[in-house]
Image (spheres, rainbow, N blue to C red):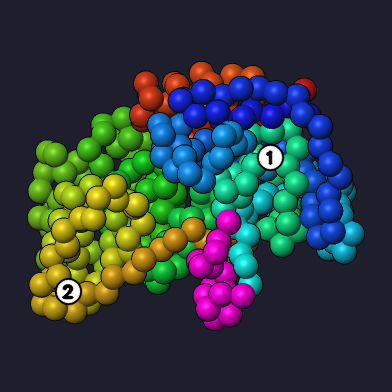
Amino acid sequence: MKAAYFTHNKTFKIEQVETAPPGPGEVEIDVAYCGICGTDLHIFHGAMPHRLGDRRVLGHEMSGTVAAIGDGVDNISVGQSVVVRPLDHCGQCPACKAGHTHICHNLKFLGIDTDGGFAQKWTVPAHTVHLLPDNMPLEQAALIEPLAVACHDVSRGRVAEGEDVLVIGGGPIGVLVAMAARAKGGKVTISEVNEARLAIAEKLGFETVNPAKADLAETIMAKTGNKGADVVFEVSGSQSGVNAMTTAIAVRGRIVMVAIHAEAPKVDLFQFFWRELELFGARVYRPEDYETAIAMIAAGEVDTDTMITDVAPLDDIQSAFEALDDNPTAMKSLIKVLDE
């Protein structure tokens, strides 16, 4: 098979490698599409080298078709369309025993701690595989992993019908969070400073605010009759976003921390006392978040044509990563792994 190995120093190397048949409890997948995640891009720029070894096949936002199954796999068949939830838990730690396997103390993230989906074949534990509806295009299905992140965030925030929702940050995950919140009945506003991303958000039907041009808290208060947002998602990863999340929120509002901040931000804890606020962390996803994401794609609740901004073949993975440095407004870039 053909695989793209990341060898550090912003370099991918395409290689032909032999594959072993799937072992007990494993599934081999012919990869169709694999998206470039923000985490992949951080790794491209030098993050987390200790988790990669000398080289690594990155990629985890994938879709594909089952090519072979190992012994003991009886709920998956060759030829089925699938996606992978790329989390392999230990089953023994306190988090796993409490039922929180997605935040296992010893969690392995497939495609970072192991080889991933920027290869024509990917062998994974069967418990990570989710089946797709027969009629779902595999290009659209490559959005399920990041959409599952958003579904988990919205679940943590307990978004309910009619609530005012503020999403701070209009990048790919922020827009998907907005879509997932809207699907729950939330009235969503997206805050973003990049005009190109604001235009995408508006095309998708969302109200927007550019906090570089208007005071975000004042705007949200005006929109909500001086109440504030019932739920705020901090997706910007910026100190200004953290500042806004405690000023644009309603009494007893809920804040979901989605972004990974490069440095520990300063948080106005006084506002948590004064307004009786709640703060939630949200990390990756649970199996049910994947099923919710699959259902949303199947129901047409995600404008996949707008979200997928470009597709490049596996042979061009180097230039595809480099292009994202020059085009930070892209929503979702996919690598087309399958050969025609």
Q: Residues within 10 Å of mark 1 (few under 14, many from 20)?
A: many
Left or right: 115, with 181 as reference point? right
Nearest the viewer among 181 and 193 is: 193
- Where does label 1 land, which residue? 138
Q: Given the image, on which type of amino acid does mark 2 rest?
A: Phe
- Where does label 2 land, which residue? 272
Quadrant of the rendered structure where residue 93 is?
bottom right
Label annotation for residue 85: none
Quadrant of the rendered structure where residue 158 is?
bottom left
SS type, badge 2: helix
Left or right: 138, with 211 as reference point? right
Q: Position of residue 46 (x, y in %)?
A: 41, 34
Q: Is residue 44 above or below residue 140?
A: above
- Tell me the magenta residue range: 92-108
The CA span between labels 2 and 1 is: 44 Å
Residue 271 part of the magenta-drawn span: no
Residue at the location (56% across, 30% down)?
Answer: 6
Q: Position of residue 310 (x, y in %)?
A: 52, 26
